[in-house]
Image (tube, rainbow, N blue to C red):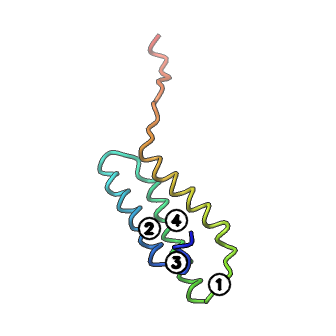
Amino acid sequence: MHPFIMHPERIALVAILLLVVSICFSTAQRRAWPTIIAGAGWAVFAMWEWYCKSRGYNIRIDLLVIAPVLYALTAWGLLSMFWRRNAVSTDCDEF
């Protein structure tokens, strides 16, 4: 998280990259909505970081909550694009 503290432009770059990845994979018939949610989370964090930078906040207890949530969202978003569930048929017509 250290490279992103007080650098909202870097955070916005991560958000844009996640959104571009989601657009590219949505054309390949993959589930892209979790990556869109992760990109939106990074975009909200970029706005929050810009606000904190403009106010000059240097003691950041909020990052103890924000960092794990963003990491979890990003991992969920990226992994869910590649993990496909095998649908089990529960039809009663097979008997």
Residue at image x 48%, y 70%? 43
Q: Is residue 27 depicted above or below 93 in this figure? A: below
User: Earlier along the polypeptide chain: callout 1 or callout 3?
Assistant: 3
Closer to the camera: disc 1 or disc 3? 1
User: Earlier along the polypeptide chain: callout 3 or callout 2?
Assistant: 2
Disc 3 target residue: 47
Q: Are marks 2 and 4 in contact (CB under 8 Å)?
A: no
C-alpha span from label 2 to label 4: 10 Å
Name the residue at the top extreme. Answer: 95
What type is the residue that disc 4 sits on?
Gly
Circle 3 — which element? helix
User: Earlier along the polypeptide chain: callout 2 or callout 4?
Assistant: 2
The residue carrying pointer 2 sits among few (fewer than 14), some (14 to 19) or many (20 or more) residues within 10 Å by Cα, namely: some
Q: Residue 86 is drawn in which quadrant?
A: top left
Labelled disc at residue 41: 4
What type is the residue that disc 1 sits on?
Asn
Image coordinates of residue 1 in percent, x first then y, are: 56, 69
User: Earlier along the polypeptide chain: callout 1 or callout 4?
Assistant: 4
Closer to the camera: disc 3 or disc 2? 2
Image coordinates of residue 42 in percent, x first then y, are: 50, 67
Labelled disc at residue 58: 1
Question: In this orientation, which residue lies closer to the viewer: 88 or 68?
Answer: 68
Image coordinates of residue 36 in percent, x first then y, are: 44, 59
C-alpha span from label 1 to label 2: 22 Å
Q: Is residue 23 depicted above or below 48 in this figure? A: above
Residue at image x 50%, y 23%? 90
Disc 2 target residue: 14
C-alpha span from label 3 to label 2: 13 Å
